Image (cartoon, rainbow, N blue to C red):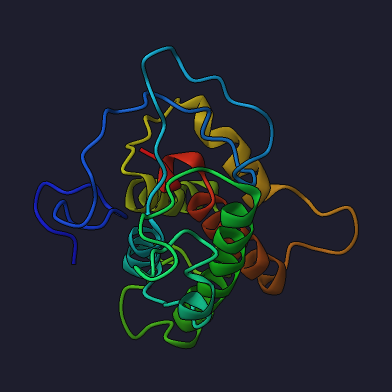
């Protein structure tokens, strides 16, 4: 359970470094690292350390990434033998492993929610089931996920929600929007939130 006063999806303050709020983000789904970002003079965007990222991933999905120990060094974790400082720079390598971790943990989290349907509140599917097509229900669960992962409350008319809603409700080009496809889409939302800049940086 998250500690009082702590943003959902973040590791406790004693683990994470303090940093300034980086302001609003577009909130659009997408893979972190796509495109260039300009940082205002005198302000530096810092990413989580490898340990902070994995702790936050487990906190929001309930699912650890089994390959973390193997690839933690590549993600910047210091071994205090050859590497004595934690890597904090955004890189293609870090981005790749963040995406790999998100794919595994989000898929496992949604699978667990589906398997335990009716047995209690899910982690990803907290307020929705795969069979739900009602946009009000979908939006409620989406708002919960954005708050859980990014610590951001969405207003009813918040345009940042639109890309996520389109992803979840769009009619497929072929076939119907069945439960299997909804499972893929909710998993994709989870992955998009874990790889979102507002999740991995501060």
Foreground residue among 194 and 145: 194
Is 74 rendered above or below residue 170?
Answer: below
Q: Is residue 56 left or right of residue 131?
A: left
Foreground residue among 2 and 132: 2
Q: Is residue 133 visible?
A: no
Whole-percent x and y of residue 23? 37, 23
Q: Is residue 21 left or right of residue 104?
A: left
Task: Name, please, the residue furthest toward the front.
Answer: 82
Give the number of callouts.
0
Q: Is residue 95 left or right of residue 115?
A: right
**At x 41% / y 31%, what residue is drawn?**
45
Task: Name, please, the residue furthest toward the top.
Answer: 41
Is 83 rendered above or below residue 71?
Answer: above
Whole-percent x and y of residue 186? 57, 61
Q: Is residue 5 visible?
A: yes
Whole-percent x and y of residue 83? 42, 62
**At x 54% / y 51%, what residue is drawn?**
195
Dividing the image into 4 quarters, which one contains the C terminus? Answer: top left
Which quadrant of the view contains residue 36?
top right
Q: Is residue 171 left or right of residue 26?
A: right
Task: Name, please, the residue furthest toward the left.
Answer: 4
Is 128 rendered above or below residue 194?
Answer: below
Dividing the image into 4 quarters, which one contains the N terminus? Answer: bottom left
**At x 49% / y 55%, what residue is drawn?**
194
Whole-percent x and y of residue 80? 34, 68
Foreground residue among 68 and 81: 81
**At x 46% / y 53%, what residue is drawn?**
137
């Amino acid at each position: 359970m998250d500690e009082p006063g702590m943003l959902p999806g973040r590791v406790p303050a004693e683990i994470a470094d303090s940093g300034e709020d980086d302001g609003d983000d577009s909130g659009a789904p997408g893979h972190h690292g796509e495109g260039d970002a300009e940082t205002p003079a005198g302000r530096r965007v810092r990413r989580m350390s490898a340990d902070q990222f994995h702790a936050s991933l487990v906190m929001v999905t309930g699912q650890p990434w089994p390959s973390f120990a193997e690839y933690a060094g590549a993600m910047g974790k210091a071994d205090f033998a050859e590497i004595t400082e934690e890597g904090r720079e955004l890189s293609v390598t870090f981005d790749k492993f963040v995406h790999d971790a998100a794919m595994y943990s989000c898929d496992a989290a949604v699978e667990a929610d589906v398997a335990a349907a009716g047995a209690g509140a899910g982690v990803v599917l907290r307020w929705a089931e795969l069979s739900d097509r009602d946009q009000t229900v979908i939006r409620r669960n989406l708002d919960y996920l954005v708050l859980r992962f990014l610590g951001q409350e969405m207003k009813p008319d918040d345009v940042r929600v639109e890309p996520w809603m389109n992803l979840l409700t769009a009619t497929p080009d072929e076939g119907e929007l069945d439960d299997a496809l909804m499972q893929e889409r909710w998993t994709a939302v989870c992955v998009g939130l874990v790889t979102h800049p507002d999740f991995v940086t501060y």
